[in-house]
Image (cartoon, rainbow, N blue to C red):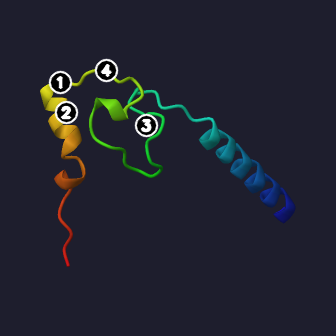
Amino acid sequence: MLLKLLALGGLGYAGYRYYEKNRVDRNGVAFADGEPEGPFRNAGSEATTSHEPMSATDEALDETYPASDATAKY
């Protein structure tokens, strides 16, 4: 029984790793080539893969993203 659970867990982990490796950003706003690694990218349309111009509202929201989060409570 324990061996079956370990095998099932290993198979699930391998499937998860395969999924994460081959995951595709479907919304078209992924990082452009040359952008730094990490959870954030530079602001502006030149930092996206599409390089399509943004509306004034979208660009303003994109530029203020980290600052628009709630403040830290020290």
Left or right: 2 in relation to 44: right
Which residue is identified by label 1? Answer: 55
Left or right: 46 in relation to 13: left
Element at label 2: helix
Which residue is identified by label 4? Answer: 52
**Label 1 crowding class (10 Å Cα cut-off): few <14, some 14-19, many 20+?**
few
Which residue is identified by label 3? Answer: 31
Which residue is identified by label 2? Answer: 59
Kind of residue at badge 4: Glu
Kind of residue at badge 3: Phe
Whole-angstrom CA distance, mark 2 to mark 3, is: 15 Å
- Quadrant of the image for the C terminus? bottom left
- Quadrant of the image for the N terminus? bottom right
Q: Are marks 2 and 3 in contact (CB under 8 Å)?
A: no
x and y percentages locating residue 51 in the rendered image: 35, 24
Kind of residue at badge 2: Glu
User: Dividing the picture into quarters, in which one does residue 7 lie?
Assistant: bottom right
